[in-house]
Amino acid sequence: SQQGEEDPQALSIQEGENATMNCSYKTSINNLQWYRQNSGRGLVHLILIRSNEREKHSGRLRVTLDTSKKSSSLLITASRAADTASYFCAPSAYNTDKLIFGTGTRLQVFP
Amino acid sequence: DAMVIQNPRYQVTQFGKPVTLSCSQTLNHNVMYWYQQKSSQAPKLLFHYYDKDFNNEADTPDNFQSRRPNTSFCFLDIRSPGLGDAAMYLCATSIRTSGSYEQYFGPGTRLTVT
């Protein structure tokens, strides 16, 4: 299945530092999405990068995609305590409505 | 605000007692999904509807069924809950149009089986 695998599984940083999470996947994709989940809540869409894009920015978020290596990274700059959450990547194949979520990275940002 | 609503937020049921979880949306999206998420795990897709077309995942147990009576509502029925079915159940929607792929999630229903 087209499941992403995130690395690291857990990450602890201080406020103001940058956080980088990586995602690897196995087969061709149409796009790759990143979602955030606060503890005990639903997921929130953060950013989508298409297979023909290499980098995308949204506020403090920067996503890169390397289709030759089948990998993506999410960078959160100048992190805040409110960024504490689990982050999931979701590669999406062509001609499907489905997302198969990766295992997630649990980010803890200390004040 | 347009949104995805799940009721109840917390549900307790007894082993073997049928339970129904509900999801409604005001986004008018044509695709609706149900996910199961166990503690510290990724959300796992159970099934989804594209309009009225039902798409079951191959590894979804027969114990789980779903109904979508109209665009706005979708239900998850667990016929005989076991202890292993205790989890967070997430409903999501999306709209199948060119260039739009993101999913919108409800807050989830946490199911406890006693």
Image (cartoon, coloured by chain):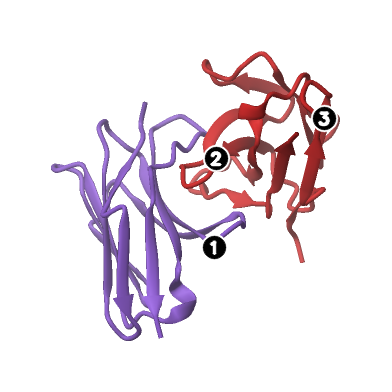
- N-terminal of the pair, mark 3 or mark 2, is 3
The residue at which mark 1 appears reads as: A38
The subunit carrying tag 3 is: B
Q: Nearer the viewer, mark 1 or mark 2?
A: 2
Label 2: which secondary element: loop
Rendered image quadrant of residue B74: top right
The subunit carrying tag 2 is: B
Residue B19: mark in rendering: 3
Within 10 angstroms of label 2, few (less than 14), some, or many (20 or more) residues? some
Label 3: which secondary element: strand
Q: Which residue is drawn at the image coordinates 37% and 45% (left, top)?
A: A31
Q: Identify which residue, B68 or A79, lies in the foreground.
A: A79
Q: Which residue is drawn at the image coordinates 68% and 55% (left, top)?
A: B107
Q: Which residue is drawn at the image coordinates 36% and 47% (left, top)?
A: A32
Amino acid type, mark 1: Asn
The residue at which mark 2 appears reads as: B38
Q: Position of residue A97 (x, y in %)?
A: 52, 34
How many numbered marks are there? 3
Q: Which residue is drawn at the image coordinates 79% and 20% (left, top)?
A: B16
- Asked if residue A44 is positioned above or below residue A50 in the image, the reply reads below
- Asked if residue B67 is positioned above or below residue A102 in the image, the reply reads above
Chain letter corresponding to the colour red: B
Residue B98: mark in rendering: none
Is B44 on the left or on the right of B107, as rendered? left
Q: Position of residue A28 (x, y in %)?
A: 27, 33
Within 10 angstroms of label 1, few (less than 14), some, or many (20 or more) residues? some
